[in-house]
Amino acid sequence: MAELGFMESLALGYMAAGSGPDWGPTINGILNDRRYKRDLAQADTDYATLVTQYNRLVDGFDELFRLARGLEDQVALQGEHIKQLEGDLIAANERATAAEQRVTTLEQWGNGVAIREAEARRDATFYENQFRGIGDMATKDAIALRKATEEIACLEAIIAGMTKGEDRAPPASDSPTP
């Protein structure tokens, strides 16, 4: 019910004042009834407002509950993902350890090869120097042999000439013959 307006209240007040003693309680009852209905309507409105607020709170709680469940589900999924990543990390560490061992083995093998290569280079340089020295000695020996052969031929010619009666002097040589 609608509240009494200013004009209605004024009219009821004039009626109560001008009607005498019989109408006073009736008008007073009408006014009290109107106030009661107004208070009842206000209480209904307050109750409806309170129910609306309660429903909003329940909806908000339900939404928070759904969000909390969703977050719990996300946390569970992330926990599973973390466990999977931990397994992957362990496997990766094992592969890295195996790779490090292979690298160490290859480094040791490479170091052995490098040592053998250095030894081979040293030996090759030694033998190359020996070869050059032997070649130089062979060249000197060949020159000396040729000179000795020439001297022998010359001496043979001298000896052959002596036996025939020719007198020849031996050739001059750079090095004394033994």
Image (cartoon, rainbow, N blue to C red):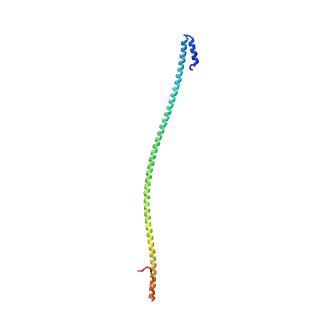
Where is the C terminus found, in terms of image quarters? Answer: bottom left
Q: Residue 113, relative to residue 98: is it above or below?
A: below
* Residue 107 visible here: yes
Q: Where residue 161 sits in the image (x, y, percent)?
A: 45, 87
What is the total number of numbered labels drawn onto the structure image?
A: 0
Q: Where residue 20 sits in the image (x, y, percent)?
A: 56, 10
Name which residue lies at 46% across and 77% down. 143
Pick whichever, 143 or 5, lies toward us.
5
Q: Where residue 45 sits in the image (x, y, percent)?
A: 53, 23
Name which residue lies at 47% across and 41% down. 78
Name which residue lies at 54% across and 20% down. 38
Q: Residue 164, relative to residue 4: is it above or below?
A: below
Quadrant of residue 104 within the rendered picture: bottom left
Instruction: Classify residue 33 as left or right of residue 113.
Output: right
Q: Residue furthest bottom?
A: 165
Instruction: Classify residue 24 as left or right of residue 97.
Output: right
Name which residue lies at 51% across and 28% down. 53
Where is the N terminus found, in terms of image quarters? Answer: top right
Pick whichever, 121 or 101, lies toward us.
121
Quadrant of residue 158 within the rendered picture: bottom left
Instruction: Classify residue 170 as left or right of residue 37.
Output: left
Q: Residue 114, relative to residue 10: is it above or below?
A: below
Q: Where residue 68 sits in the image (x, y, percent)?
A: 48, 35
Q: Residue furthest top?
A: 21
Q: Residue furthest left?
A: 178
Pick whichever, 103 or 147, lies toward us.
147
* Residue 1 visible here: no
Q: Residue 109, relative to residue 92: is it above or below?
A: below
Quadrant of residue 17 within the rendered picture: top right
